Amino acid sequence: MVSFFSNLINGLSLGSIYAIIAIGYTMVYGIAKMLNFAHGDIIMIGAYIAFSVITSLGLPTGLGILAAILGCMVLGICIEKIAYRPLRGAGSSLAVLITAIGVSYFLQNTALLIFGSNPKMFTPIIPFKYMTVKIGEFSFQTISAISIVVGIILVILLQTFINRTKWGQGMLACAQDRGAASLMGISVNGTISLTFAIGSAMAGIAGVLLCSAYPTLSPYTGAMPGIKAFVAAVFGGIGSIPGAMVGGLLLGVIEILSKSYISSQLSDAIVFAVLIVVLLVKPTGLMGKKIQEKV
Amino acid sequence: MMMKKMMSAALAAALAVGMLSVPAMADGTFKIGAIGPLTGGAANYGLGVVNGAQIAVDEINEAGGIAGAQIEYKYEDDELDSEKSVNAYNTLKDWDMQILVGSTTSGCSIAVSEKTKADNMFQLTPSGSAQDCTKYDNVFRVCFSDPNQGKASAVYIGDHQLAEKVGIIYDSSGVYSSGIEMTFEAEAANQGFEIAVKEAFTADSNTDFSSQLQKCKDAGVDLIFLPIYYTQAGTILTQAAMMGVEATFFGCDGLDGMLDMDNFNKELAEGVMLLTPFVADAEDEKTQSFVGKYQEAYGVTPNQFAADSYDAIYTIKAAIEDAGATPDMSVSDLCEAIKASMLKIEMEGLTGTITWTADGEPTKDPKAMVIRDGVYTAAE
């Protein structure tokens, strides 16, 4: 029983990281209606920025996190402007998808060029001796608790922003019908830039949290967690921000439990099998909205 | 008609030139070539090999060469691509290479061995550790093969009674890791310990190791065997510290390099053991002199690849001297002579005292190292 709860806690720890990545993923998809496959690599860049500021320059941790958020924000806006915007009118959403994969490779190789292939060890944002909290027989990683709390705060903030502010309403309008939104005087390009800025800022936060929990930082650090988080976002219902949170946590728990009780080699297969079953039963994901076909 | 005649004359001339270049150069030097990835992600390995060999060549030439004959040395880049490795081999052959040190990595070495076999050229790979690297009789290696590392680790753990219950965490998607794991497990059956936990991860799930570590913790293992690369080992050590796993960690040469990771918290590695043929911090005179020369010439600390390659050049020297071979012998005759001598010589190298068997495998005692206060020290 003790080991079951330990596994559950480990699952939540992993899930909390997936969740925080998935929120950024799903937000960009929900508004811009495109899969930004480079999201995982923006996370990696964010982690490198934080690493450079905190470890190489020796500045305070808070400044490092801020630099990661701002750096990713600028990066996100630039990527959108240079790589995605020119293709937006091209008609085929496939073109943007392929470009996103290209951007992902571009970021990985740029990091390889600048930082080299030798992995770096990220200094966690909390001191080592506070890394775990012991309650009786269980130990809980502080960073997971922080991730979950930060995740919940972000979900609430984003939901409020989208539903209560003018910019947020603009985003919803763009998501629904870009043509009509621009007729209503909403700047579609500006709104999508803003979406990318917020989504990438989340990637910056996710990068710091990811590397605090799993400290090995290399140019490929973001790739696999990025894909897993994408699965989490689909699992929870892509486009739904609370769904991404729930999907991420569930995915982490399923992954760890199947590793522990079924097979450590088959865990990925099991995770994806669960995803298929969920999508068969509920095609829009756990918390996805039903899309009404317009006639 | 005229055209035809000219063509055939030209062809005949080309043929004659071609034939002239076939015999090895009789100018009194041994021509040794090296191949490795000098650019790209594996550049550290290839640079180690070509630079380590360069230092050995310079030393030998300064001391009068091999039985009076100087060494000419040339290297080519293969960018970790087996096709380019074969091209590099052809380039070196055009230069009249007689002996090959390389390729650096397993895949490239296997590809090139098809060519050296056809040409019957003596090939000595410093670091190609996959089993197939030495499948032909003209190919020998300096490093341990992957399977041998697993066996040696199991024997070491058994002999020194390091543990009663052992856990294994390995990468089932990598040849290196799964190769070592297999022979470790086979040899463990003959040793006085039990493998209580055997858990895998793959290249796609190498971020989180909490469930594997949890199983080791639940089973109460004394030692966790990590036949993996240091990138993942860094994460495993961090997570183990957070989860309070109190076992000794034991790895192979893949863990070498861990302490060089940027910003690595060396406290985490305290007490980690590894079997490796070479560590730059070793105190013996030979290692010290090599490391000093290498640092002076290239500004970095040499890795195991450099040491293996340094030993490769000295091995060739020892074998040539034993055989009484001369630079004017043909590539094939030279190969036969060296091959016979390889089985007779005993090399006192940087990476230990080495002897070879006919299947190209080296026999040497791996050195066990333990990390204390952030440096490698000899175990025991």
Image (tube, rainbow, N blue to C red):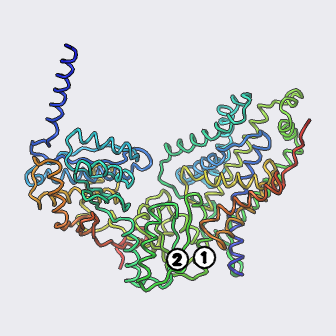
Q: What type is the residue that disc 1 sits on? A: Lys
Q: Picture coordinates of residue B262 (x, y %)?
A: 48, 56
Image quarter for residue B245? bottom right
Q: Residue at x 43, y 59 (%)?
A: B260
Q: Which residue is mark 1?
A: B215
Q: Secondary structure at mark 1?
A: helix
Q: Picture coordinates of residue A104 (x, y %)?
A: 60, 43
- As drawn, B354 above or below B33: below
Q: Which residue is mark 2?
A: B167
Q: Residue at x 68, y 49 (%)?
A: A203
Q: Picture coordinates of residue B29 (x, y %)?
A: 12, 46
- As drawn, B325 above or below A193: below
Q: What's the CA distance linking mark 2 and mark 1? A: 9 Å
- The answer to whether one can see residue A252 in this image is yes
Q: What type is the residue that disc 2 sits on? A: Gly
Of residues B222 and A170, the one drawn nearer to the viewer in this rendering:
B222
Q: Residues within 10 Å of mark 1 (few under 14, many from 20)?
A: many
- Judge left or right: residue A52 versus residue A163: left
